[in-house]
């Protein structure tokens, strides 16, 4: 009986031990932390400045900065590994879909190396003018200035999306052995030139259409005016003929009245002439129709490239 109880205790202890190992492993897997630090490295967390050590946890909202001699290696839970060179800074912003998980890095300046896990495609690295989507990839992202950034890929492929005002976002696939460099000022200038060219073409087309429409309207107006003149002349001729007939009739009536009046008295003649004028017999009638500038591709060697060699040490 004692042997049975002892065996049960041993089994319970073994099961508890393995359960504890699994819990610790799961906790470590869900935690992003610094694995190696050299030189000046700091974390800006709210209004505090923290000097990290090996094992220091990296949290959502942290900003990491390295000084002139600073190097750091960070294990990202679920996403992969990143290494940071001197004079580099980046922020870990919160994402709406995974608010408690570090899957997005916003580069401010400097150079960052990353190796993303092959079974996870959530890692995103952005600069002020581009977004990089990765999976199972070894690559380097560098921010050279406020307007220039570059990406070089040693393994796998990275979707590189330039973000420029006035330009429709489009992913450019950068594969192993390739480097892409984005000069936003040149690209924005090229986009502006294209937009101005398109606007000028549209304006020319509208002017041509307007000129054609004006000519057509003038032609139609001329034809309408000619038709109205024709109708007016015909109406005037008809009215003249009618007026003449009425006038002749009136004159005949006036002559008869005059002759009759002569036999009566002179005052009656004056009244008859006045009546013929008042009837208006002598009135007059009147008728009246993206450039690739700023984006350059080049080849790189994953084995011989000095930046990759430096990060692999």
Image (spheres, helix red, strand yellow):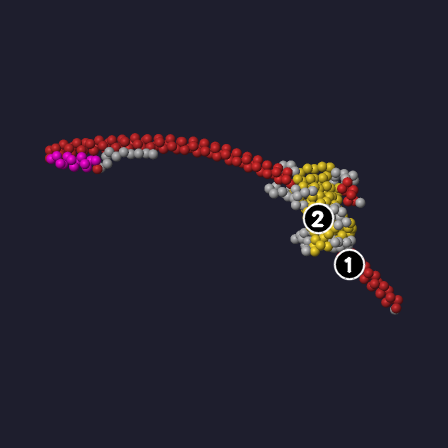
Q: Give the side of residue 32 with respect to residue 249, left or right.
A: right
Residue 123 vertical placement versus 18 (above, below): above
Please tell me whether mark 2 sits on a helix, a strand or a loop.
strand
**Residue 168 percent coordinates (x, y):** 61, 42
Task: Give the residue at x 66% y 40%.
Answer: 183
Task: Give the residue at x 43% y 32%.
Answer: 218
Of residues 282 and 57, which is closer to you in this image?
57
Task: Give the residue at x 11% y 33%.
Answer: 263
Of residues 301 and 65, which is closer to you in this image?
65
Residue 148 lies in the magenta-colored region:
no
Find disc 2 in the rendering and name its residue: 89
Question: In this orientation, does residue 177 appear?
Answer: yes
Find disc 1 in the rendering and name its residue: 23
Q: Are marks 1 and 2 in contact (CB under 8 Å)?
A: no
Residue 22 vertical placement versus 250 (above, below): below
Residue placed furthest toward the bottom: 1
Figure quadrant of the N terminus? bottom right
**Residue 46 percent coordinates (x, y):** 68, 55
Precedes in sequence: disc 1 or disc 2:
1
Question: In this orientation, does residue 135 appear?
Answer: no
From which residue to which does the magenta span run? 265-277
Give the image quarter of residue 152: top right
Near mark 1 (Cα within 10 A), the count class, few <14, some 14-19 or many ≥20, is few
Predominant secondary structure in magenta?
helix
**Residue 302 percent coordinates (x, y):** 77, 40
Figure quadrant of the C terminus? top right
Residue 270 lies in the magenta-colored region:
yes
Of residues 311 and 195, which is closer to you in this image?
311
Please tell me whether mark 1 sits on a helix, a strand or a loop.
helix
């Amino acid at each position: 009986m004692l042997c049975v109880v002892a065996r049960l205790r041993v089994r319970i202890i073994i099961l508890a031990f393995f359960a504890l190992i699994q819990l610790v492993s799961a906790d470590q897997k869900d935690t992003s932390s610094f694995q190696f630090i050299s030189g000046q490295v700091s974390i800006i967390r709210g209004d505090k400045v923290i000097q990290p050590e090996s094992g220091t946890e990296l949290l959502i909202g942290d900003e990491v900065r390295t000084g002139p001699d600073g190097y750091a290696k960070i294990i990202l839970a679920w996403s992969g590994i990143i290494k940071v060179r001197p004079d580099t800074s980046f922020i870990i912003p919160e994402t709406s879909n995974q608010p408690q998980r570090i899957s997005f890095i916003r580069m401010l300046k400097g150079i960052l190396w990353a190796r993303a896990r092959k079974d996870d495609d959530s890692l995103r690295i952005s600069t002020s003018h581009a977004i990089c989507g990765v999976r199972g990839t070894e690559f380097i992202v560098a921010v050279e200035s406020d307007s220039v950034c570059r990406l070089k890929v040693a393994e796998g492929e990275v979707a590189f999306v330039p973000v420029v005002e006035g330009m429709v976002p489009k992913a450019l696939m950068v594969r192993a052995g390739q480097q892409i460099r984005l000069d936003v000022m040149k690209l924005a200038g090229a986009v502006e030139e294209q937009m101005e060219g398109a606007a000028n073409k549209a304006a020319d087309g509208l002017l041509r259409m307007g000129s054609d429409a004006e000519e057509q309207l003038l032609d139609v107006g001329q034809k309408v005016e000619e038709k109205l003149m024709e109708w007016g002349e015909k109406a005037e001729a008809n009215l003249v003929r009618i007026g003449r007939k009425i006038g002749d009739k009136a004159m005949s009536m006036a002559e008869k009245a005059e002759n009759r009046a002569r036999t009566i008295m002179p005052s009656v003649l004056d009244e008859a002439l006045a009546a013929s004028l008042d009837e208006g017999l002598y009135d007059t009638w009147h008728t009246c129709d993206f450039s690739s500038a700023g984006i350059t591709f080049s080849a790189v060697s994953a084995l011989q490239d000095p930046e990759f060699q430096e990060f692999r040490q």
